[in-house]
Amino acid sequence: METWRLLPFKIANAFENMAMDEALFRVLQEQGGPPVLRFYGWEKPSLSVGYSQDLRDGINLRYCRQSGIDVVRRPTGGKAVLHDRELTYAVVSREKPPFTPAGLIRNYQAIGLCLIRGFSALGIDVRMAGDKPGNEKDVIKNRRPVCFAVPAPFELLSRGRKICGSAQVRSRGCFLQHGSILLEFDGAMNGLVFANPHDLGNDCPGDDMESRITSVRAETGASIEAETLSAVMERAFLDVWNIRFMEGEPTMKEQELKKDLMRNKYTNPSWNEGPFGSS
Amino acid sequence: MPVFSDDLLYSREHVWVRVDGDFAVIGITDYAQEKLGEVLSVELPEVEFEIERDESFGAIESVEKATVELISPVSGEVVSVNEDIDDDVGIINSDPQDTGWLIVVEMQDLDELDDLLDAKEYHDFVLQEGEVD
């Protein structure tokens, strides 16, 4: 039975969350070690944008500034996510079974199976986008700036609506995949952050956000806390992969690297605004 | 089935090198582009940027929402960047080992090439990863 490290649920700000994920990824590249699973939340509504996303594209930065919404650039690909009432997971590992170096989507599948098991424990029927012949139409190339507007291959859908969005970064035989599981979806705030309704998937009259995006609350009617859901998802990872967890805190080296990344990268406008700036 | 060209050297980070005197033309391997899927964007250094062997010199993002760091196989100064990619990033998928090249580096230390793999060795390396026939 393989042992994974488990870093229990923790709430932090946007900059610390990204710095922690990257620190785990870098230290694993350098030193090796078992896979890491961690869960976290966000101390206030925050916007993360993809590694190469243009901040000028469809994001109302003035509203973000006025509303105190922190904006951070992720180390991973994909499009923008407004993090608020959600549980975020991160998996850091070498590319070895159950993960594989071939085909990025196989990691989405491997991790998706665990998340589906967790959703099932809550009574939510979730499947992967484009999971079988006939479901190819689930997947649309996302030219919009919003992650949740459309599902990528093997992202998770409930009743055809996206409930979890994920992204990866890979380097030196290791990967970091993190993703947002929506506990509740705030359509009003999303509508203010992403100023163009079309960007949220409103392609035609009557096609609103709620027809594209769902949440744990929308599916169960219950308000479930992020930490409660993290315990459910931990159990699901154990069951699907027959692993055991070694629970603990980040190592000293990971903590120091996290602080360094926070100071020099994730709170640095040159990183967050990216090559395109924010004007 | 990915192409393993005999006239290239390869790194274990799935980057190829075509040596021309002191200059190294660098790109991602056909195997890597197959793994990556459709490329959406690429970030490359500017001309005159000094890159270090085993350090990141840029990143590629795919439609599958993954950023893959580009790890340099050699150290030296970037002397050219493929501007055709600005017009059509798709050439990284369609012709990764020729017109989809990324940068040209004037190498500092040609001995660094000794650590790279030939086509057969690289093929064997990716076979060990268990993903090609």
Image (cartoon, rainbow, N blue to C red):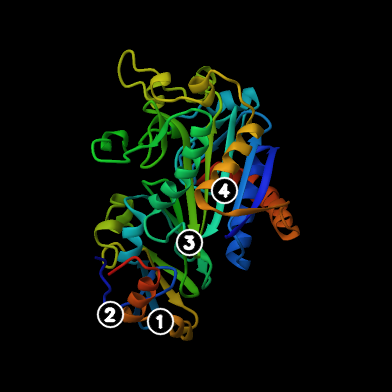
Label 1 – label 2 distance at C-alpha: 16 Å
Q: Residue A130, relative to residue A33: is it above or below?
A: above
Looking at the picture, which amino acid does disc 3 mark? Glu
Foreground mark, 1 or 2? 2
Foreground mark, 3 or 1? 3
Q: Which mark is residue B7?
A: 2
- Report which residue position mark 1 lands on: B22
The answer to whether the residues at label 1 and label 2 have Cβ atoms under 8 Å apart is no
Classify 10 Å Cα crowding around label 2: few (below 14), some (14-19), many (20 and above).
few
Looking at the picture, which amino acid does disc 2 mark? Asp
In the image, taking residue A219 as reference, residue A41 lies left or right, namely: right
Q: Chain of mark 4?
A: A
Earlier in the chain: of badge 1 and badge 2, it is 2
Write the residue at 66% across / 29% down. Answer: A44
- Report which residue position mark 3 lands on: A95
List the single residue furthest toward the top: A206
Label 2 – label 4 distance at C-alpha: 47 Å
Q: Secondary structure at mark 3?
A: loop
Q: Secondary structure at mark 2?
A: loop
Q: Secondary structure at mark 4?
A: helix
Label 3 – label 4 distance at C-alpha: 19 Å
Q: Chain of mark 2?
A: B
- Report which residue position mark 4 lands on: A238
User: Residue A10 in the image: x percent, y percent?
Assistant: 70, 40
Front-most of B62 and A239? Answer: A239
The answer to whether the residues at label 3 and label 2 have Cβ atoms under 8 Å apart is no
Looking at the picture, which amino acid does disc 4 mark? Leu
